[in-house]
Amino acid sequence: MYINRDVLGKLFFAIAILIGIFMFICPLSNMMIHVDEYWTVSLINLPFIEGMRVAACDVHPPLHYLIIYALSPITHNSLFALKVISIIPYLMILAISVTKIRKDYGWLTSGVFAFAIGTMSIFFIEFLTVRMYPWAILFMILSFIYFKEVIDKFDRRSWILLTLFTLLGSYTHYFLLITCGLMYLLLLAHILRSPDKREKVKSWIYSVISLVILYVPWFLILMRQIGTQMNVTYKDMTLADIFNYITSFAINNPDFTVEMILLKVLAIIFVGFVIYLIYKHNAKYEASGIFLMFATLIVGVAILSVSFRPLEVRYLIAAIAIFWLSVSILLSKIEDDKILAILLAFILIFSAASIIITHDESLSRIDWQNDRTEFLDSINNNSTVMVYNTNFGYMFIHDGVNKTTEYSVSDTYFFDDNVKICEKIDQIIDKNPKKNIYLVNWKSADKSKKYVKTLNLTEEYFSGEVAVLKLIEPPHPIEDGDS
């Protein structure tokens, strides 16, 4: 059995290029919009200062928003252009694969990695979502590459680039604080085993101090963001969730169907096989990539479980990227064609399954968006009154109800000029007799439970994140002290 590695790698890379082209086509044919994207779109349509104030109240760091603001003179914040901004990191990863990675490890590693980044797990979906995750993937890959450069060369350029990409990643997604922190600990462990460790430890300390100094301004905001989420209740983590976390590098689907269980068992076998080959070839760099993904998972679950919410697989996406880079590099060390064929067969099986799951998820998002549009179109007229109780409800609804009268019971957000502020629902009802009144996201805030209990409401729409309740009949008088 003979496998031409260069030809095979070029084939994989050609498929990765086609995937990139398809990413551009998708938003033109069907504009998939995830619920969280409404937050991003609403935020970046605010003036810069106001937008950054809102970003500071979110649970994410600011770099992704800064990138969008910087490009807004070109994009004019059109939804397609915003999607393209999320595709740019994939194109940059392709460029890195065909240059740096190909030069260091050959065409097979370059092609398989580019292919995996476009097909595995939730990569494709995330590269089409207007969120920070595609940029986090890019910066994590670059950090991991220069982690190896520091180990091999220990020159100033490598240290500067490692520090830079680590900083950029940390300002893009908080989970990179975990992955990069663990990576720096691995680097320190390597340094302490080297003969000239004194000078190398100094370089490590300088890098860490630089990162701390440059991150301190936002770290204070991070602490406040964590505080705002401590009392928020989310669903408990299940056994299915844990099983899905462990195998999410290949398959992201928490269902316990026979097909999913078989695929996840294959994923676990694959990891075991990869670890065996790493040990056999003494592949320390590849071992660090596998370790970083699973260590990020363990630390992330521990931190989020004792703080405020269970882990979402998308939080791991950057660590999953370096897992696949490590696996792809390992392929370049496999001389036995039969073993290589087995590994490639695993990769093709996981890719095929992930593509099917991605297709189903895409259709689900399109249906979700169509349902939202259909509902908002049905109530978007001058006989409708929308009353917002949360900023997120406003962000989700506002762009689809331009013909209605809109109110907010809070002035803590930068609402559009046509949104009136009125804290008392009674006054809003009195000012709008004979109109259909809808309360948006009123179930999610404690201060509004008295209204939900007292008013005769029916749920007209629920997105999974946002509920729209319709007032059926005039309410009984409500006193401020009622509960």
Image (tube, rainbow, N blue to C red):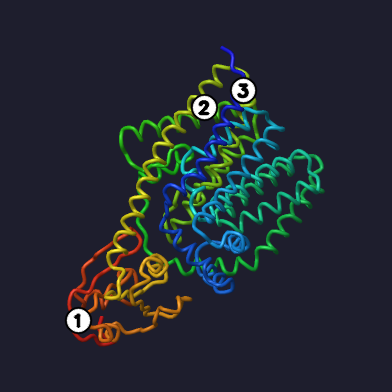
Q: Picture coordinates of residue 379 (x, y %)?
A: 28, 68
The circle on residue 15 is none
Query: Camera-side residue: 373 or 392?
Result: 373
Q: Picture coordinates of residue 456 (x, y %)?
A: 19, 74
**Neighbours of disc 1 within 10 Å: few (<14), some (14-19), many (20+):** some
Q: Secondary structure at mark 3?
A: helix
Q: Secondary structure at mark 2?
A: helix
The residue under the point 24% across, 71% down is 470
Q: Which residue is mark 3?
A: 7
Q: Which residue is mark 1?
A: 475
Query: Camera-side residue: 128 or 159?
Result: 128
The residue under the point 60% across, 44% down is 91
Q: Which residue is mark 2?
A: 273
Q: Quadrant of residue 196?
A: top right
Which callout, 1 or 2, points at the residue further toward the start of the chain? 2
Can residue 279 be seen in this snapshot? Answer: no
Question: Compared with residue 151, is residue 340 higher up or lower down, i.e. above or below?
Answer: above
Q: Picture coordinates of residue 191 (x, y %)?
A: 74, 44
